Image (spheres, grey):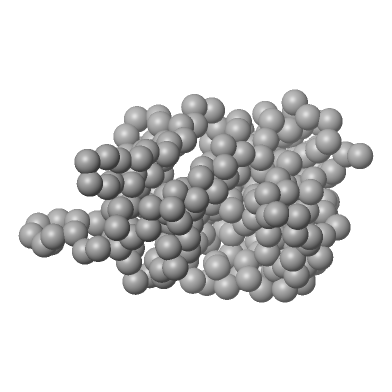
Amino acid sequence: MTTPVTLLGPSGRMGQALLAAAGQRDDVRVAAALDRGDAPGQGRELVPGVVVTALIDAALAAAPVYIDFTTSAATRAVAEVARGRRVAAVIGTTGLDATAQAAVDALAEVAPVVAAPNFSVGVNLVLGLVAEAARVLGTSWDAEIVELHHKHKRDAPSGTALGIARAIAAARGQELTAVGRFSRDGDVGARPAGEIGAVAVRGGDVVGEHTAYFFGSGERVEISHRATDRGIFAHGALRAATWVVGKRPGRYDMLDVLGLRGGRGDRS
């Protein structure tokens, strides 16, 4: 069975990766493409029979699910229209502001939404590994995360770094809002016990690298993931799109898509 999808932002890096990945698969097809009005290629035929449009409603009408790796403002605008149509969504946009997050939450009330900071199978494995390490090591070991991305990335720390930090905090029974530290400058004093730090590095064309460090007395543990091709995220998102159609309304993530929630079924 082939799943029709609406592709958002085909002129962007992830949009191009998604288009290339879709062309390599027989379980999905791009049925519509939505981009901003001034985007390169607006109005051209993206694939046979699919012309890039700036009309949200028309683009969403073409498929039962859309894939969104765009910006906070675009995510909000499309989710608001999608709610009226009850269209399923796969959302990988990071750095969402409060209004965009509220729009995604509202969409999930009436349609299934897979929202994840990272659609790589390897990164989702890392989330499980860091949680297990955090449970075993506890707060007596200092946890820090270092992430590297290309110079054009706008949000920091990355959504994946924050996801790793949340996994560590949850495994240790902490609230990230209380123990997270995402910048240090000047005389900040000694590192508090239980703090979880995250540092962002930007430069060149780095696709994405994340390392979680656990520092003990006389030893340290490192858990790393390095992405060298955006195709891994694109294939993961397309897999999520084929999975989410027909699911009950609610929020899902890649652990659900990959069946890594210990046998739990659909979540409402």
Camera-side residue of 262 and 151: 262
Position of residue 139 measured from the top left corner of the image (x, y, whole percent): 33, 60
> Can residue 220 be seen?
yes
Position of residue 159 measured from the top left corner of the image (x, y, whole percent): 47, 52
Q: Residue furthest right?
A: 1
Q: Is residue 18 above or below residue 160?
A: above
Horizontally, is 9 left or right of 168 in the view?
A: right
Horizontally, is 75 left or right of 44 in the view?
A: left
Position of residue 70 measured from the top left corner of the image (x, y, whole percent): 56, 50
Q: Residue furthest left?
A: 187
Horizontally, is 125 left or right of 258 in the view?
A: left
Q: Is residue 44 above or below residue 107?
A: above
Query: Which residue appears at 27% of the width and 40% of the height?
Result: 219
**Number of numbered callouts drawn:** 0
> Can residue 90 be seen?
no
Position of residue 194 measured from the top left corner of the image (x, y, whole percent): 30, 63
Camera-side residue of 267 and 9: 267
Please identify the quarter of the rendering in which residue 174 is found.
Answer: bottom left
Q: Is residue 169 above or below residue 153?
A: below
Query: Which residue appears at 57% of the width and 37% of the height?
Result: 122
Camera-side residue of 8 and 110: 110
Query: Which residue appears at 73% of the width and 41% of the height?
Result: 239
Question: Which quadrant, please, contains the N terminus?
Answer: top right
Question: Which quadrant, please, contains the C terminus?
Answer: bottom right
Please identify the quarter of the rendering in which residue 134 is found.
Answer: bottom left
Horizontally, is 217 left or right of 90 in the view?
A: left
Query: Which residue appears at 38% of the width and 44% of the height?
Result: 212
